[in-house]
Amino acid sequence: MRIEGPNAVDTAPTSSWPGVAGPLVASQAVPPTRRMPAMLELLKPITWFAPMWAFGCGVVSSGVPLSQRWWAVILGIILAGPMVCGTSQAVNDWFDRHVDAINEPDRPIPSGRLPGRRGLLIAVAWTVLSLLVAAPLGRWGFGAAVVGLALAWAYSAPPLRLKQNGWWGNTACAACYEGLPWITGAAVMTATRPEWQIFAIAALYSAGAHGIMTLNDFKSIDGDRQTGIASLPVLLGTERAAGAACIAMALPQVAVIALLLGWGFVTSAFVVSLLLMTQLLLMVRLMAAPRANAPWYNATGTTLYVIGMLVTAFALRMPT
């Protein structure tokens, strides 16, 4: 959520949405820069990679040749990224517009580039379009879309607004970004319920993503604290939150390695072990200055994490 926006204005309307008060546009000027169209920026294409990658891992782990269900792969990637994830970003930006006015006043809604309730209308429209895209993917693809969209709204919107608590919010977000797309990818390829091994691995990598979500919260500590959002960096402090994130990321990978060894995938277990050990070394630097180094770790350690996901996916497609 750090994409530049236009100059903010001082005469924006105030919010009339329940529980949100104050101007929706920040009063300070934001330097003009090159920027993408407001609607595309609202959907945050940079965030689409994670669920698309997880969906791809699910496809690989199914063991079904791409040639047999190529259309489902294309449709599923569109569903996981631009549609469901894009919807979640639009929903979050609408219900977080008062927070973004503090943390990121150049976002499309607080900057005034999407005036009135246009952001909410986009979120609703993208929800409906996501369901239409999911319909041809069968009951598993459509069901996963329903669950993902429900979590997207529950995460940001009242009365649940799961993001008010870092433990619950990050759990929902991690499930939508990793576990759910992985299971969906496998299900749409096999047109049936995936094997329990796929459920187990998807759940573990989803649990590890809780730590990634915690590190992502470091960028919005000030706004979260001012608006009463109890993210883990706010609840625990930066050092304890970073430590919790490291544990959350590392322990599931240890479990993945144990499962791979138990299933006879020794080479894959060795590769994931090397990736984990490198992450542990990077975590030392992260812990030295958590708030400053969180973006750096998300660009380095998280990359190794998702590479491990793909290595594991290729292992699952092989017979035990």
Image: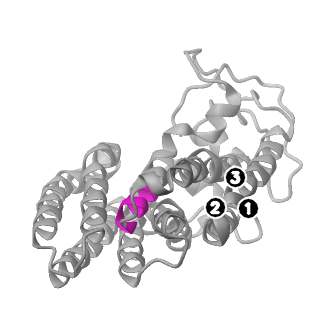
- The CA span between labels 2 and 1 is 27 Å
Residue at x 70%, y 32% (from the top left corner): 39
Color theme of the render: one colour
The residue at which mark 2 appears reads as: 137
Residue at x 31%, y 55% (from the top left corner): 306
User: Where in the figure is residue 32, as x and y percent of width and height?
Assistant: 59, 14
The residue at which mark 1 appears reads as: 157
Circle 3: is it few (<14), some (14-19), or many (20+) Cα within 10 Å?
some
Q: Secondary structure at mark 2?
A: helix
The answer to whether residue 274 is visible is: yes
Give yes or no for contact between labels 2 and 1 (Cβ–Cβ under 8 Å): no
- The CA span between labels 3 and 2 is 8 Å
Q: Quadrant of residue 169?
A: bottom right
Taking 17 as reference, is 141 above or below it?
A: below
Q: Is residue 72 left or right of residue 282?
A: right
Circle 2: is it few (<14), some (14-19), or many (20+) Cα within 10 Å?
many
Q: Is residue 203 left or right of residue 147?
A: left
- What is the chief secondary structure element of the magenta stretch? helix
User: Where in the figure is residue 153, as x and y percent of width and height?
Assistant: 71, 62
| Label whose residue precedes the other's in the sequence (2 or 1) | 2
Residue at x 50%, y 62% (from the top left corner): 181
* Most foreground residue, 160 or 199: 199
The amino acid type found where label 2 is placed reads: Leu
Magenta residues? Answer: 54-62
Question: In this rendering, which labeled residue sits more in front, label 3 or label 1?
Answer: 3
The amino acid type found where label 3 is placed reads: Val
- The CA span between labels 3 and 1 is 23 Å
The amino acid type found where label 1 is placed reads: Ala
